[in-house]
Amino acid sequence: MSQSIKEIQEEIIDEFAILDGDMEMTNFYVMELGQKLPEFNDTDRTEDNIVKGCQSKVWLTAELDGDKVIFKADSNTAITKGLVSLLVRILSGQKASEIVDAEIFFPQRIGMERFIGTQRSNGFGAMIKQMKLYALAFKSKIEA
C-alpha cells in the first residue's frame, strides 16, 4: 500500500528534524534530494512546461496513470531542484482528488522559510499551485 500525502510529509519532517536546523547541512541535504529526481526528458524542457512564478527555471510535467497523477520535474538550479523533488515525492502517484484537497504543511514544520528566502518561497508556492492545477484538470477528466 502506498503512503498518503500526510504520511510522506511526516516522513520529510522527521528527516529534516535530524539536521537540527543547521542551515548548511539543510541546504546540502536539499541539493542531494534534487540529485535523486528521475531523469527528465530533454524534449519536455519546453516553454509550456515551465512553472510560471519561479525565479529559477522549473519544468514540470504530469500524466495520468489509472487514477493516479505522475509528476516529473527538473530545474536549472540545485536548491530549486531539491525543493521540487520534495513535492514530486509527496504528490506523484497520488489520486488527483487527494492532490487537489491536500494541505501542504511540511514547509512550515521544517522551517523552510529560514533557508530558502522570499523569492524561492514564492516559487515554491507556484510549484504547488501548478501541481494542484494539473490534478484538478485530471480530476475533472476522471469525473466527466
Image: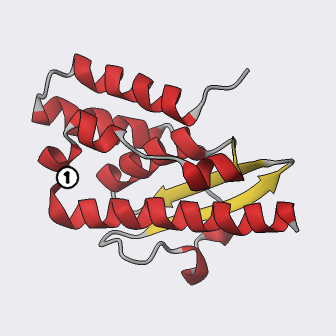
Q: Quadrant of residue 3?
A: top right
The structure residue drawn at horizontal position 25% and vertical position 61%, both measured from the top left corner, is 120
Q: Is residue 141 above or below residue 6?
A: below
Question: Residue 10 vs residue 36: left or right?
Answer: left
Query: Colour scheme in the image?
Result: secondary structure
The reply to whether residue 70 is visible in this rendering is no
Q: Position of residue 35 (x, y in %)?
A: 44, 40
The structure residue drawn at horizontal position 44% and vertical position 42%, both measured from the top left corner, is 86
Q: Quadrant of residue 72?
A: bottom right
Three-letter amino acid code at the position of disc 1: Ile
Along the viewing direction, whichever of 18 and 141 lies nearer the viewer: 141
Q: Secondary structure at mark 1?
A: helix
Which residue is label 1 attached to?
116
The reply to whether residue 97 is visible in this rendering is yes
User: What quarter of the picture does the C terminus occupy?
Assistant: bottom right
The structure residue drawn at horizontal position 65% and vertical position 69%, both measured from the top left corner, is 44
Q: Position of residue 80 (x, y in %)?
A: 34, 55
Q: Is residue 126 above or below residue 105?
A: below
Q: Position of residue 106 (x, y in %)?
A: 35, 38
